[in-house]
Image (cartoon, grey):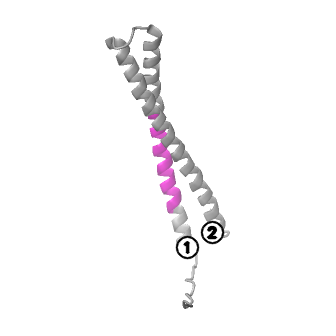
Amino acid sequence: MDAGDPRDEIVRLEAQIEELAATLESCRKFILAARIAMIGGGILFAATLLGAIYFDPRVMLAGAAALIGGIVMWGSNVGTAREAAASLAAVEAQRAALIGQLDLHPVATRPMLH
């Protein structure tokens, strides 16, 4: 960090916090979609395999692909979410340290006029 105004750095860190929060939210949505794909693919695959629905190799393949794709998408987004959460905690700690360095004065309260 430079020796400039810490307020500029705080503004930059707050923008970074917003980006990381958006990344986390996106990961949560993809994790939900991955879970739905895993459940749907697993049900479709098992139903075809057990004969609950008419056997069609394409349906069975689609179920297996959804199951495997869901697992891959879930694992990838869980890893990304963990990294983003760790980065978010570090950036928030930096911002809190910079705010602590500021010479802030409490604002005097005015008497209530009723």
Q: Nearer the viewer, residue 67 or 113?
A: 113
Residue 46 as seen in the image, left or right of residue 26: left
Provide the residue span drawn in magenta.
74-93
Magenta residue check for 75: yes
Mainly helix, strand or loop, the magenta region?
Answer: helix
Q: State the quadrant of the C terminus.
A: bottom right
Task: State yes or no: discs 1 and 2 in contact (Cβ < 8 Å).
Answer: yes
User: Which mark identifies residue 54?
Assistant: none
Q: CA distance from mark 1 to mark 2?
A: 8 Å
Q: Position of residue 76 (x, y in %)?
A: 48, 34
Q: Amino acid at mark 1?
A: Gln
Residue shown at 56% from the left, 55% from the top:
17
**Residue wearing tag 2:** 6
At numbered mark 2, what does the secondary structure look like: helix, strand or loop?
A: helix
Query: What amino acid is labelled 2 in the image?
Result: Pro
Determine the secondary structure under disc 1. helix
Q: Which residue is mark 1?
A: 101
| Residue 66 x/y as whole percent | 46, 23
**Depth check: 37 or 89 in front?**
37
Classify residue 55 by image quadrant.
top left
Q: Nearer the viewer, residue 6 or 84?
A: 84
Neighbor class of circle 2 (other Cα within 10 Å; few <14, some 14-19, many 20+) is some
Q: Is residue 44 above or below residue 111?
A: above
- Please identify the quadrant where the N terminus is shown: bottom right
